[in-house]
Amino acid sequence: MTKFNIDRYKKLLKTDNLGRNIIYLKAVDSTNSYASRILKNKTRGNKIQDGTLILAETQERGRGMRERQWISPPGGLWFTLIIKTTLDRKELPEVTLIAAYSAAVILNRLYDIEVIIKWPNDLYYKKTKLGGILTEVEEINKDIFLIIGIGINVNINIDDLSPYNNESTSIRTILGKDIEREKLLTEILLEFEKDYIYYCKTEDFKSIFNKIEGILDYNVANFTIK
């Protein structure tokens, strides 16, 4: 496995804020759990900035929704964003969809991989899972922080995903080659920052949803667009 190149990442990054402060870890239980500990001052030595990115080569106890196990071997993209927000907790589904769309549109733009967002937080290629998003919230001294975890199976052999019983895939499997994780991550962050800032400023999720709807598999009864 090729180690994530932080210098290359910084050269490629074009965001104004997201990911400018990066915490790189060789291994961690869960990037979301690590972010939560930082915000609660249980992890020392790291200055927390809005937009901080926590990136790990592996997760030992990666989590999906409802505490489901998320297998996170070397070669994937396992990362969490910490964002101080003015949004309400009830707007978490919108933020999760914006994050999922950011990953989906970049995978299509860079590698011609047609991704479907399976409600509420999974990225699918055909009938196999390629990635997922887990959005959580921490309230610290009346400030609200979003903890947005994203996991994508990138340069991973299909055998490493065998515990999923052939229900998951990876970019390596789809394309038959490895791709540059640094490029993929920086493009996702830029795409997400653009739509997230727009949503925060305007609260106009309908315009964003018009873009998302074409690749979204969801139950209309479970989601209302304002």
Image (cartoon, rainbow, N blue to C red):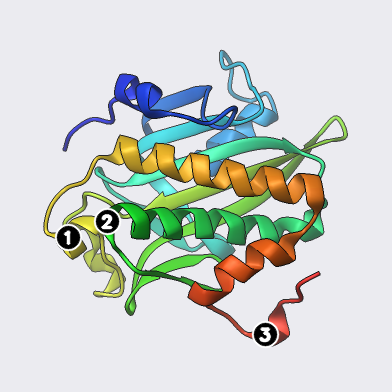
Q: Circle 2 — which element? A: helix
Query: Nearer the viewer's eye, disc 1 or disc 2?
Result: 2
Farthest residue, direction left: 176
Whether tag 1 and tag 2 are in contact, CB under 8 A, the answer is yes
Callout 2 amino acid = Tyr
Q: Residue at x 32, y 19 (%)?
A: 7
Q: CA distance from mark 1 to mark 2?
A: 8 Å
Comparing 151 with 72, the one in front is 151
Query: Nearer the viewer's eye, disc 2 or disc 3?
Result: 2
Tell me if mark 2 has few (under 14), some (14-19) or many (20+) residues whose alpha carbon lies within 10 angstroms of its own.
Answer: some
- Give the vertical position of 158 relative to 29 (above or below): below
Q: Residue at x 56, y 68 (%)?
A: 212
Q: Looking at the rendering, which quadrant does residue 201 occupy?
A: top right
Q: Which mark is residue 220?
A: 3
Q: Residue at x 71, y 86 (%)?
A: 221
Comparing 129 with 30, the one in front is 129
- Give the vertical position of 105 relative to 221 (above or below): above
Callout 3 amino acid = Val
Residue 81 is at least partly visible in this image:
yes
